[in-house]
Amino acid sequence: MKKVAVIGSVIAILLVVNVALAGDNPSGTPFQAIWNAITNLQSQITNIQLIPGPQGLPGEPGLQGIQGEPGAQGLQGETGPQGRQGIQGEPGSQGEQGEMGASGETGPQGPQGLQGPKGDPGEPSWDETRIADLEARVVYLENLNQPPEPQGFSAYANFKRGLSQYLSITDADQVGLNITHDMTIEGWIYLEADMPNNTDYEIVSKYDIDYNIDSRAYRFYLSTYGTQALYLNTSQDGSNEVANNAAWSPIAQIWYHVAVTRTLTTTKFYVNGMQLSTNNQFHTSTTICDNSASFIVGQLGVTPDDYWNGKMDDLRIWNVARTPAEILANKDIELTGAEAGLMGYWKFNGNALDSSLNGNDLTNNNGVTFIAY
């Protein structure tokens, strides 16, 4: 900094001398060289880069001054007067509401319908007919799951109604088929087609349709006269008959096991081992006539009528009333033929021979065929 001050002083002196000698015009000849030298020197001095000297040690900080006392708070200015509130604009007028459309006229009320006729009073809750009908429906539903063929058998007999086919044995040749007291008839049946109305299809009969004395004993058949049902007709005197039945409507082309049992007081019907009705079917005849009619499978009486149309298998006739448990337990198995009370047993395994101990072999009429499963 001292160097700069000295150089600055030299320049100032030279400028004074130069002005004194030359006045305001530095272009005078005697001093031109001096002026040029001064200008040159001034330019060099201006371009000199000053190098700072070493920095001295920092001095110790001085003592902090005593803090001055705060000045007194100025007086609060007076609150200016509140400005006037502007005038509120007037609300716009509400638009007019559109007119409501005219309501349509209500149509005239239609006349009240006539009250239906009063229903018949229901039957008593324990009405036997209704119970039997419901039980028959249950059996019908169970039959929908029935296997398409009997289980445990090898062949069956096939009857064609249009060809008047049936199997038979004369009264003179039969043994034990004139059953006069308790009895059971059972076997597997199969309808080829639905039965027409007002028709009988015979399963078993020892019965003539004539009203001659000693012509009727028993017949087991399916009928569509009125309500479709299984029937067992018996006669005590060979002429007058008592008909017991249980409503049942089989489906064509499905196998069913059917059975009927009779004692001196009751008759019961079974399908697939289940009783069609829990109510006993009562009858008035106590014994069954020991008649002279032929025993026939698939047809009624000496005067040909009521032919079966379909199949049969494992047909059995007993001189005892089998229990529900016995019917259910044995319907799907072949018997030995030596069972107590078994009067006739036809397996139809290729023929119409009797497998019981009585030898009641049947005659084939008009070509009943035997077909393996």
Image (cartoon, rainbow, N blue to C red):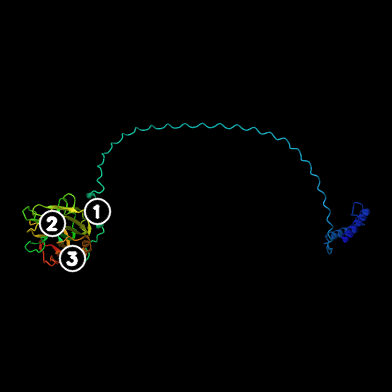
The disc, 2 or 3, on the residue closer to the chain's N-terminal end is: 3
- Left or right: 2 in relation to 281: right
Q: CA distance from mark 2 to mark 1?
A: 24 Å
Sooner in the amino-acid sequence: mark 2 or mark 1: 1
- In the rendered structure, find residue 253 and report the number of the disc placed on it: none
**Residue 295 visible in the snapshot:** yes
Query: What amino acid type is highlighted by mark number 3?
Result: Ala
Residue that mark 2 sits on: 219
CB atoms at circles 2 and 1 under 8 Å apart?
A: no
Circle nearer the viewer, 3 or 1: 1
Whole-angstrom CA distance, mark 2 to mark 3, is 25 Å
Determine crowd level at label 3: few under 14, some 14-19, many 20+ residues with C-alpha closer than 10 A: some
Amino acid type, callout 1 = Glu
Mark 2 residue crowding within 10 angstroms, few (<14) / some (14–19) / many (20+): many
The alpha-carbon separation of the residues under discs 3 and 1 comes to 31 Å
Q: Give the residue at mark 1.
A: 135
Pick the front one: 134 or 1: 134
Residue 112 is situated, as x and y percent measured from the top left of the image, at 31, 35
State which quadrant residue 121 falls in.
top left
The residue pinned by badge 3 equals 155
In which quadrant of the rendered image does the N terminus lie? bottom right
- Which of the pair 362/71 is nearer the observer? 362
Q: Residues within 10 Å of mark 1 (few under 14, many from 20)?
A: some
Name which of mark 3 and mark 1 comes first in the sequence. 1
In contact (CB < 8 Å): disc 2 and disc 3: no
Query: Could you say which quadrant of the image residue 301 lies in?
Result: bottom left
- Front-lying residue, 91 or 54: 91
The quadrant where residue 5 appears: bottom right
